[in-house]
Image (tube, helix red, strand yellow):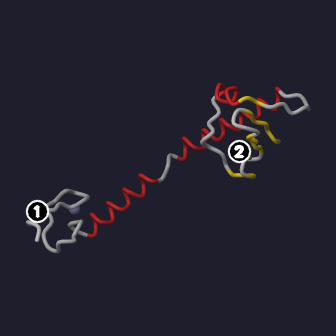
Amino acid sequence: MKKEEKRCCQMCNEILVGRIDKKFCDDQCRVMFHNRIRNERVPDLKTISAALRKNRLILEDFKKAQSRTQRKIHRTELIQKGYNFTYFTHHVSKNQFGVFDVSLIEENKEEYSIQY
Ligand SMILES: [Zn+2]
């Protein structure tokens, strides 16, 4: 048997007494601990929605700049404008990333086209 070590509450660091498998001093600490974990997992929605709106505006700018013929856009052009490839609203298909009502089609590793 392992030598008894001082165990502390995972929330408030109080020394625990009682059952060996105890992790928290009481229910309040247990609930606070789990709430904190859950809150840490929730991403910053303001940052994400700002990135999505920016992506949508960038695609809009390309739309305005494009003539009727759809040209391919190089990945670096999108990056230069500040496009964030991490964020899209949905998958239209495997290589087509929706940003609200517009989508970005990955033609190959370097080139994209936009579908309005
Ligand atoms: Zn505690």
Residue located at (21% from left, 71% from top): 21
- Residue 16 image point, x, y percent: 15, 65
Q: Is residue 51 above or below residue 82?
A: below
- Residue 23 image point, x, y percent: 23, 66
**In the image, is 82 to the left or to the right of 104?**
left
Query: What amino acid is found at the position of numbered circle 2 in the picture?
Result: Val
On the image, which quarter does residue 77 sit in?
top right
| Nearer to me, 18 or 35 | 18
* Residue at the disc numbered 1: 5
Quadrant of the drawing holding the N terminus: bottom left
**In the image, is 49 to the left or to the right of 62?**
left
- Residue 107 image point, x, y percent: 76, 39
- Mark 2 closeness class: few <14, some 14–19, many ≥20 residues within 10 Å: many
Query: What amino acid is found at the position of numbered circle 1 in the picture?
Result: Glu
Q: Is residue 108 above or below residue 11?
A: above
- Which image quarter has ligand 1? bottom left
Secondary element at image label 1: loop
Q: Marks 1 and 2, how far apart in space? A: 54 Å
Secondary element at image label 2: strand
Quadrant of the drawing holding the C terminus: top right
On the image, which quarter does residue 71 sit in?
top right
Q: Earlier in the sequence, mark 1 or mark 2?
A: 1
**In the image, is 88 to the left or to the right of 27?**
right
Residue located at (45% from left, 53% from top): 41
- Residue 25 image point, x, y percent: 20, 66
**In the image, is 96 to the left or to the right of 83?**
right
Instruction: Residue lying at the far bottom in this picture: please name it.
Output: 19
Residue located at (73% from left, 40% from top): 106
Q: Nearer the viewer, mark 1 or mark 2?
A: 1
- Mark 1 closeness class: few <14, some 14–19, many ≥20 residues within 10 Å: few
* Residue at the disc numbered 2: 99
Residue located at (60% from left, 43% from top): 49
